[in-house]
Image (spheres, helix red, strand yellow):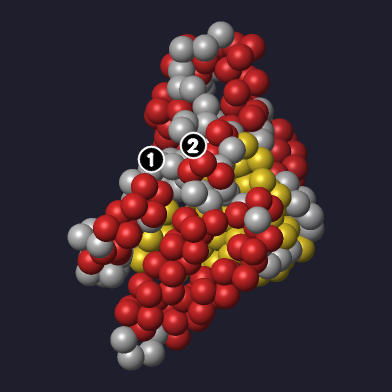
Amino acid sequence: MLDLKALHENTRIDHKSHPFQLFQNRCWGMKTEECILYLHWHEHFELIFMRKGSALFHIDSRPYVAQAGEVIIIPGGALHVGYALEEGDVHYDSVVLNSALFHDFTHDPVHLKYVAPYLEGKVRFPVKPAEHDIACQGYYSLLDEAIEEMASQPLAYQLVVKSKLHALFTLLARTFMPHHLPDKTTGSYFPNRERFKLLIEQIEAEPTGKMSVTEAAGQVGLNTYHFCKMFKKLTGRTFVEYVNGCRMTRAEQLLQESSLTITEIAAQVGCDNANYFTKLYKQYKGMTPSQGRLK
C-alpha cells in the first residue's frame, strides 16, 4: 500500500535527460473502498495501466472506473486519488513523464501543430481514451512495451521508451484533434482547485489537526453546504471520512515503525478515546490496531 504523502508530490524522476519514471504499484489484500492512491498532484503527466483488480479514480473531482487492461491519462496539475472497488489485490503501473522528454521535437512543425498543444495543457486527452474511440485500445501496446523497457532496462532503453511514448502521444493527438473533443476535455474541471490543493495539503501534512468543516469551507471560500458537496465530489469521501482516513494511515505507520503503545498512538493521531480509535482503525484498515502491529 502506498505511503501517505503530501498533496503536492515531488514525484521522483531520476534522469533529467530522460524525464520519465515507472512505478509498479502492487496493493495486496485491499478492502472495498480502501485508498490505493492518496490525493495529490504534480506537474507531470501520469499514465496508469491497470493490471489486476478494479479501482475508482477521482481526477479533478470526476470519477473514473478502471478495470484490468484499461489505461487512464492524468494531465499535469490534476488532483487525483484512487480507491479499490472490491476486495482483493489491485495492481497497476504508473508512468510519470515530463513534457521535457520531447524537447528534441520543439523545432518540428508537425510536432508543434499536433502534439505540443497537449503537452502544454492547451487541450487535454480524454482520461479514458478507449471509451471515446475504441481504436485507442490498439495504441496501448506502445505503453505496455515502454513499461517493459523501463522495468528491464536493457541497453539504450531510454531511447526506446522515448520513441514509444512519443508515438503514443502522436496517435492520441491524431485521434483527438481539438474539434473532435467534447468541451469537457478542455479547461479546468472545477472552481477553486488551487485553494483545495492548499487545504488538502494541510490536512495530509497535519492529519491530527482539529480543523472543523466550517473552518475548512472558509479556507476555500465556500459555504459549508457547497464545500461538503465539492469535497465529496473531489475525493469520493466526506471531509470527516477523509481526515479520519489520513489519521488511520498515520496510525498504521506508527504501529509498524514505532514502539509507542496503542493508547499513545491513538492520542498522537487525535483520538482521545482508545476504544473509539480501535473502532476507527478497524473500519478503515479491516483489522484491529493489535493486528496491524503484527502485520
Residue 211 versus residue 38 in the image, above or below? above
Asked whether, in this view, residue 94 is left or right of residue 17, the answer is right
Q: State whether residue 216 is above or below residue 245.
A: above
Q: Secondary structure at mark 1?
A: loop
Viewer-side residue, 142 vs 241: 142
Instruction: Tally the numbered discs.
Output: 2
What residue is drawn where x is 45% and y is 85%? 152
Indicate the quadrant containing the C terminus: top left, top right, bottom left or bottom right.
bottom right
Residue at (64, 12) in percent of width and height: 225
Q: Is residue 95 visible?
A: no
State the SS at label 2: loop
287 or 18: nearer the viewer: 18
Q: Nearer the viewer, residue 277 or 53?
A: 53
Given the current orientation, which residue lies at the most extreme bottom position? 155
Q: Amino acid at mark 2?
A: Thr
**Percent x, y of residue 293:** 62, 58
Where does label 1 land, which residue?
122
- Any part of residue 149 in sight: yes
From the viewer's perspective, is 176 left or right of 198? right
Q: Image point 43% across, 74% down: which residue?
A: 164
User: Which residue position is annotated with label 2?
Assistant: 186
